[in-house]
């Protein structure tokens, strides 16, 4: 029974309407046949039970001209004549009346069974969306045209909800960013103000005051540049093309060697990627990997490990150092903008992991951080379709 109900529920509009009309017309055919049979039976019984035979002149045409004779004619009471006329009228008009009623009933049943519920749900969903309420799901079981329309509407609602969440996250992120920006600007501004006051009161020589002020101004300029660079990263979109993976891996190897050599750290480079080509943005992969290797080299004691792997349509770059690792607070806030556990913020503003996360997400991947007490591990993932 459930399969039968599901079959009829999933019928297309055209098939459903034809089915309703055919069933209704068949019912009208049966009703018309019954009504006409009943009327004929009643007429026959009325004519047979009470009438009077009289002779009346009758005329008919022959070859010799009109010929008149007396014939027997049945004469019924007036009441029976009216009854017979009424039954004949019913017999004549019952067919169009039944057919018209059948079509109307079929249309009403079609609307009630196939359109009323989805239209009501769509109307309610539209009203909730207009009221900025997206916390609901439009679930209509049928797979007919209205079911597909409801599915499309639900996809639109889900997309709007996701966009709203994204906008909300960006607003919250922007608030935190502005708060961090204001907090980090306070220190150089305070130093500038103190230096200027000391110079005005004669407590600091002009040359020394100028040098101190230039350092803070330079720091402010680099901070503003970092803000501009971060905004560009947020707006950047990957340029996908078929890339030679082995050449890309060699570039990453050379870059990692240079960074670790400059920092005085040993590099352990592991390549486990077998594919020759893939569709990705080489510049984003290189930039993220370079950023993570530079962070690892800065915090490592002696060793930095870079491991490149692939799985399905994803490429992974895992960078590990043997430094102090992430604290519990670092694990929670490491990928936020302008967060750093280093008290000296004159050279590093805490944007490395945040920019890497933004670029990875633009590339269909993400950033994952781990810490086991013996060092920190950061894994960057990138979506990369096979180029073969």
Image: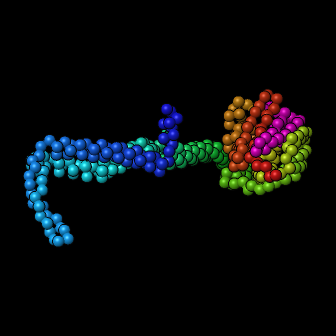
Segment colored magenta: 299-325
The answer to whether one can see residue 38 in this image is yes
Which sits in the foreground, 49 or 346?
A: 49
Q: Position of residue 186 (x, y in %)?
A: 65, 45
Which sits in the foreground, 182 or 41?
A: 41
Q: Is residue 105 left or right of residue 66?
A: right
State the image quarter where residue 112 is shown. top left
The answer to whether one can see residue 203 in this image is no
* Residue in view at x 77 percent, y 56 percent: 241
* Residue in view at x 35 percent, y 50 percent: 103
Colouring rule applied to residues:
rainbow
Q: Total of numbered circles in the picture?
A: 0
Residue lying at the far bottom of the rendered structure: 64
Q: Is residue 156 left or right of residue 275?
A: left
Q: Position of residue 101 (x, y in %)?
A: 31, 48
* Residue in view at x 55 percent, y 46 percent: 155
* Residue in view at x 72 percent, y 49 percent: 363
Q: Position of residue 261 (x, y in %)?
A: 91, 44
Residue lying at the far front of the rendered structure: 64
Residue 324: say if magenta: yes
Q: Position of residue 344 (x, y in %)?
A: 75, 41
> What predominant SS class does the magenta segment belong to?
strand
Residue 226: say if magenta: no
Which sits in the foreground, 343 or 19?
A: 19
Which sits in the foreground, 209 or 172?
A: 172
State the image quarter where residue 49 is shown. top left
């Amino acid at each position: 029974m459930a399969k039968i109900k599901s079959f009829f529920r999933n019928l297309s509009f055209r098939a459903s309407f034809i089915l309703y009309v055919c069933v209704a017309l068949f019912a009208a055919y049966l009703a018309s046949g019954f009504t006409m049979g009943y009327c004929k039976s009643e007429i026959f019984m009325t004519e047979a039970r009470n009438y009077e035979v009289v002779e009346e002149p009758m005329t008919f045409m022959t070859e010799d001209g009109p010929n008149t004779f007396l014939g027997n004619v049945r004469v019924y009471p007036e009441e029976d004549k009216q009854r017979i006329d009424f039954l004949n009228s019913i017999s004549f008009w019952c067919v169009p009346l039944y057919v018209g009623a059948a079509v109307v009933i079929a249309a009403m049943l079609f609307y009630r069974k196939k359109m009323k519920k989805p239209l009501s749900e769509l109307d309610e969903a539209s009203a909730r969306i207009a009221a900025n309420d997206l916390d609901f799901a439009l679930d209509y079981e049928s797979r007919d045209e209205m079911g597909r329309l409801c599915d499309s509407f639900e996809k639109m609602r889900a997309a709007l909800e996701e966009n709203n969440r994204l906008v909300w996250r960006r607003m919250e992120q922007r608030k935190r960013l502005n708060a961090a920006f204001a907090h980090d600007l306070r220190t150089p501004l305070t130093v500038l103000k103190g230096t200027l006051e000391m110079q005005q009161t004669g407590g600091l020589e002009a040359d020394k005051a100028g040098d101190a002020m230039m350092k803070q101004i330079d720091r402010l300029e680099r901070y503003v540049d970092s803000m501009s660079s971060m905004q560009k990263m947020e707006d950047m979109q990957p340029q996908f093309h078929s890339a030679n993976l082995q050449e890309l891996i060699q570039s990453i190897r050379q870059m990692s060697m240079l960074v670790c050599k400059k920092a005085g750290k040993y590099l352990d480079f592991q390549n486990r990627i077998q594919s020759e080509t893939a569709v990705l943005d080489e510049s984003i992969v290189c930039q993220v990997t370079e950023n993570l290797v530079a962070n690892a080299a800065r915090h490592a004691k002696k060793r930095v490990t870079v491991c490149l792997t692939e799985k399905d349509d994803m490429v992974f770059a895992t960078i590990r150092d043997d430094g102090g690792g992430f604290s519990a607070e670092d694990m929670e806030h490491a990928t936020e903008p302008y967060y750093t556990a280093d008290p000296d913020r004159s050279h590093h503003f805490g944007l490395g992991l945040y920019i890497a996360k933004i670029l990875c997400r633009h590339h269909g991947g993400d950033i994952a951080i781990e810490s086991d007490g013996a060092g920190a591990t950061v894994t960057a993932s990138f979506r990369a379709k096979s180029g073969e």
